[in-house]
Image (cartoon, helix red, strand yellow):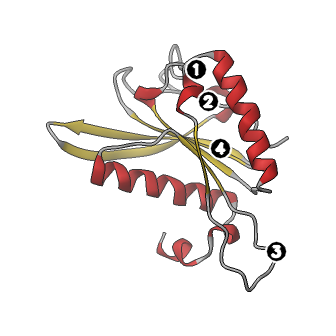
Amino acid sequence: AAGADAKPLWQLDPEEFAVTAIQWVLKDFMSEGQVPTVCYLQPAPPRNPASQAPPIGQVNIRPAFTTPENLINCSEFLRQQAADASAPAAAIVARKSSVGYPCVWKGKPKAEWSFDDKADGVFMQLESPKARMMFFTVINETKGKRSIGDTVPLDVDSFGLFPRIFK
């Protein structure tokens, strides 16, 4: 992971970008107990190599997970943001306990979703033109003590929170 941090964000491949994004989120959770509901947009390469690295895009998507209409509107908004920024990839992050819709884990067989319904964690959906991936990282917080459990890959077609961002 330390090697990935040395590269500018715009040079990372989509998977490296997703790993970097989830590391930021888990670090914040461990230090502050917060998990943002956010879409990180990977910056495009700078037009002028001498210019400073472009900033990462951050879009608050908390309202997306309240109703189907909000999810559709937010998906369209993210598509536009990604296109306007020429973003090569997007990492969508949401804490399971803040997702009211779509509850993608409900009714899944144990082979696909091996966690207890009450288990909390962080969903991370990677979107790029060539790759779509989904991960879930278990997080625990009891009596002020925080811990991070396993990260497991999930089938993006079954567990994806958002439809395709890149067409």
Point 49% across, 19% down: residue: 100
Front-most of residues 23 and 70: 70
In the image, which is nearer the foreground, mark 3 or mark 1?
3
Cα–Cα gap, marks 2 and 4? 11 Å
Q: Earlier in the sequence, mark 4 or mark 1?
A: 1
Can you give x and y, in whole percent of width and height, for residue 129 in the image? 81, 49
Q: Is residue 118 above or below residue 31?
A: above
Q: Earlier in the sequence, mark 3 or mark 1?
A: 3
Residue 114 visible in this rendered orientation of the protein = no
Front-most of residues 131 and 145: 145
Q: Label 1 belongs to which residue?
A: 102
In the image, which is nearer the foreground, mark 3 or mark 2?
3
Cα–Cα gap, marks 2 and 1? 6 Å
Amino acid at the residue labelled 3: Arg
Q: Is residue 120 above or below residue 134?
A: above
Q: Determine which of the numbered discs, if any, sits on residue 133 in the image.
A: 4
Q: Earlier in the sequence, mark 4 or mark 3?
A: 3
Q: Label 2 belongs to which residue?
A: 161
Cα–Cα gap, marks 4 and 1? 17 Å
